[in-house]
Image: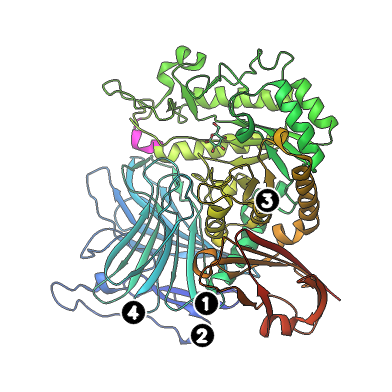
Amino acid sequence: MPIYVKDNIFVLETERTQYVFGIDNSGLNRHLHWGAKCDPADFFIETFGDENSNHTMLDEYRQEYTVFGSTMYRECALKVRFPDGCRELDLQYDGFAQEGDTLEVQFSDRHYPLKVRLCYELTPGFDVFTRWVRLENTGDRPILLEKVCSAEFSLPSQKPYTFRNTNGAWGGEGIECVQTLTGGALVFESRRGISGHNQSPYFIAYQNADEASGDVYFAALAYSGNFKVSAARDLYSFTRIHVGLNDFDFSYTLQGGESFETPKVFCGLAKGFGDMSRQMHKFTVQNVLPQAFAEKPLPVLYNSWEATGFDVNAENQMRLAEKAAAAGVELFVMDDGWFGARNNDRAGLGDWFVNSEKFPNGLQALISHVNSLGMDFGIWVEPEMVNADSDLYRAHPDWTYHYDTRTPHELRNQRVLNLTRADVQAYLFELLDRLLTENNIRYIKWDMNRPFSETGADNLENPQMLWYLHTMAVYTLVDRLRARHPQVQFESCASGGGRSDLGALSHFDEVWPSDNTDAIDRMTLQKTYTLLRPVKTMRAWVTDVGGPNKPTSLEFRFNIAMQGALSLGGDLTKYSEADMEICRENVALYKEIRPLVQFGDLYRLADADEDEFLCTQYVNKSKTESVVFLAARGTRFYKKRVILRLAGLDPVRRYRLEFDGKMIEKSGAYLMEAGLAAHIRGADYNTVLRLFAV
Ligand code: GLA
């Protein structure tokens, strides 16, 4: 049984780990353990008093979910304001409810009508489990929520932990930052309205860990708006982490009788970063992604953005589609420029009507042509935005977030629609529903190209709720469209990977991880993307970007893009016959290895940044097949010969592979322990090894 409850102690057991907390005799929730399994009967709750007038017991206790108030001075997980002005919480334990793998531990305020439920869900077969919090106002006067985390975590060791997160940017979404927290706090957050390109809504904390070993604690927040992950190491040397909605400019009015449920957090303890990624890949596919396409291989797509920009028309899209079909593409996606007066980024956003100059016969002629070539058709939209130069804005200038007294700041010449308004939601649903009803569209690329500003929303009694309500409105719109059009896949894009969190992946099938399609940069960005997100959700285009860093060959670009959901994005009309042959061969190869790449176990054997070459291996579930990608951007100092020690194979099976132009056969044990000596030579080196069990 994975959940044991005894004497107010809750023991949650995953496959290999244990998570324990309890309620002490004063009714306080206390964190007890997160680590390897112990005998549940051994746990007890120690209580002690204040050390002195400055070191309070409430500061020192490791709590399961710390609320603001009393003599607790460190970071809290929950802070509210009651109608009479009281800003402190004082919770008493009310009992628990357990149903199968789900546990709810209930508390209520000793004086005010607020219930707090800490929720946990175990998923059999995983060391990943899910946490969230439910609040309920059981009175009739509003309670203002000022900070609500989805979870608080206490790490076991009193020695400092190192944290992996990102310090990314547009075009550099996966640039990592690694720092050791010895004191004070580390904060990773977004204040932009979306989760953004910069910091990431997760923590990965460890002491001595690498790809294959060491305890790695992690948690990823399923939320695409303003988030905050804050870790602090206190004077007693304990590291605590809070994960949830950002409290920056946040509040939420919980009316009498209403409930509020936080976004979920998927958390776990793994053996090494590789184990963490493999668990999260499988967990996300099985439990987080919309299920319609979760277990299905994603099609090879072509996207026209880099080829035609805003200059799309029926004719040029048909020509591109013919070339894409000839390369073996399965889904043709027309990007920006097909609607309203959209000839550049200065006009048209909001007018989701087909531009009749560019498409005199509507989209029908193009879609029929694409379908006749054997491909599905997809299209780009950016529903949350409006250009001031649009019919929509002219008709409804009040539909954006704004203050009458402030100048609206535009970014990319656009403003953010106030999606907390029911009329805006209805407009967008009606137009997108019509677009999908009238046309055989199988794919929506849902873009979002600017952070919020001038966040006035006078339709709301409490406008600070807009940050949260906007994100929920996006999710609801996508869910409603999916329910009406279950054949349509949805991709989340926000100027590249600005909305690529686990919340997006609860509603979208895949992500556009970066506008940066430079293969050299992608070697780094794709590694970070797949730390906690499934490989299959990572769209990767082969484009004509020769590389702001260094030009790479078409084969090299395929090698890198095939490590995710392969897509094409170059101007195929300019490709030579030899280039087209490279496309055909690689797309055909990808279709063969796609089940391995999209659903296999990923092993990161070498890192482009640390090792000068990238080596990524994928193994299928039954360990009968594997594919290894090797690529180098030019090695230095005559370091060319490397021993490739593979991973994830069955040690007793024998595998056949073509290596250095020869067919060889070796045991899994040999390939993993002794390894193969690879000769990595020259710039632009890339090769794909395929292993088959004999
Ligand atoms: C954003 C996206 C691109 C492309 C353009 C179109 O920048 O990230 O992929 O769709 O918008 O305007």
Question: Is residue 376 visible from the viewing direction of this image?
Answer: yes
Question: Is residue 127 visible from the viewing direction of this image?
Answer: no
The residue tagged 4 is: 158
Query: Residue flagged by tag 1: what amino acid is it?
Result: Gln
Q: Quadrant of the C terminus?
A: bottom right
> Does mark 3's beta carbon lie closer than 8 Å to ligand 1?
no
Ligand 1, seen in the image, is in the quarter at top right
Q: Name the disc covering residue 18, or none.
A: 1
Left or right: where does residue 495 sit relative to residue 239?
right
Q: Earlier in the sequence, mark 2 or mark 3?
A: 2
> Is residue 591 rendered magenta in the image?
no
Query: Residue flagged by tag 3: what amino acid is it?
Result: Ala
The residue tagged 3 is: 565
Q: Are marks 4 and 2 in contact (CB under 8 Å)?
A: no
> Does mark 2's beta carbon lie closer than 8 Å to ligand 1?
no
Tally the marks: 4
Cα distance in 3D space between marks 2 and 1: 7 Å
Q: Name the disc covering residue 38, or none.
A: 2
Taking 468 as reference, is 227 above or below it?
A: below
Query: Residue flagged by tag 2: what amino acid is it?
Result: Cys
